[in-house]
Amino acid sequence: MSHVTQPEDGATASSPLPSPLSAKRVRVQHIARAKAEGIPLTMLTAYDSLTAPILEAAGVDMLLIGDSLGNVMLGHSSTLPVTLEDMERATASVARSTSRVMIVADLPFGTYEDSAEHAFASAARLMKAGAHAVKLEGGTKRAHIIEALTAAGIPVCAHLGYTPQSENSLGGPRMQGRGDGADTLRRDAEAIEAAGAFAVVLEMVPATLAKEITSAARIPTIGIGAGPHTDGQVLVWSDMAGYSDWVPSFVHKFGQLGPALKEAASDYVAAVRTRSFPGPDNYKND
Ligand code: KIV
């Protein structure tokens, strides 16, 4: 049974799309205004020029070139092997194929943690590839980096809670912010806001704590596995679309893309084997 509340008026995917935050490029001021006006923000990951324009046409506000690229597209078992070159290529590909969404690109592991200078050099490469903002993981300990990037004209989205680049020290994907961790998370949220972050992703955080942080913060919170009270939501696009069988429990599959693709490909195989493809419409004799 679906755990997504269905609209009472029976609206479906074919209903009119909600009006976008901006008819032109979505920028930081539109994101800030959405929080002020209580308009829920939508963000999905994107990694390529085949998928990104479809997600943009669906009305998404922000596309995140997530370092989940490593798991989703490159076959890695974590985000740790993802390189700046991987992120540049994906960012450029999404930038070339979209015109309205705000593009947020992840700074991959090992490209920003040690100094503000290193972070700037890495972030500049992602901005030159077409990003409009970067995302980085960590709170208080990254505040000086957020401050430096913001001062250099690079909008920064912070990422708190479960931070996949620290999966080894966090003991794998698990809820953060329970017990004493709640205070640390509150302090981290304050620190990244004071440092100038324009938004913050809250991943795998108890819904009550996410709600509290959301009402205390002046910047928008974007939740993933953090309940319904954040200012926006983000999902990995292929999880959202039902591309693979397994998805985390906080995901709802809004489509069945995996089975649909498999069916199309097996129909193709059968048609070639039975010589029903190519059919008369698909070729010319002269
Ligand atoms: O890389 C990613 O996809 C992310 C989201 C899970 C927020 O950081």
Image (spheres, grey):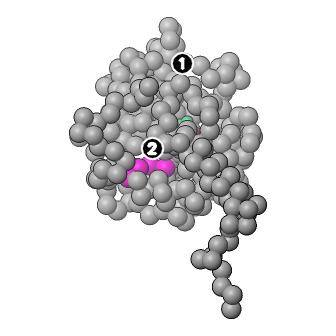
User: Looking at mark 2, is its residue's CB closer than 8 Å to ligand 1?
Assistant: yes
Question: Where's ligand 1: which quadrant?
Answer: top right
Dot 1 falls on a residue whose secondary structure is loop
Mark 1 to mark 2: distance in Å? Answer: 21 Å
Front-most of residues 194 and 246 = 246
Secondary structure that dominates the magenta span:
loop
What amino acid type should be assigned to the residue bearing mark 1? Gln
Q: Determine whether label 1 and label 2 are within 8 Å by CB.
A: no
| Whole-percent x, y for residue 226 in the image | 45, 25
Which quadrant holds the N terminus?
top left
The residue that appears at 50% across and 31% down in the rendered structure is 251
Number of marks present in the image shown? 2
Which quadrant holds the C terminus?
bottom right
Q: Does residue 119 show up?
A: no
Vertical placement of 59 versus 256: above or below? below
Q: Earlier in the sequence, mark 1 or mark 2?
A: 2
In the rendered structure, which segment of residues is drawn in magenta? 59-63
> On the image, numbered disc 1 is attached to which residue?
176
| Whole-percent x, y for residue 16 in the image | 29, 53
The residue that appears at 50% across and 12% down in the rendered structure is 178
Say which quarter of the image contains residue 244.
top right
| Whole-percent x, y for residue 125 in the image | 62, 56
Vertical placement of 241 versus 268: above or below? above
The residue that appears at 30% across and 50% down in the rendered structure is 15
Vertical placement of 80 versus 161: above or below? below
Marking on residue 51:
none
> On the image, numbered disc 2 is attached to which residue?
43
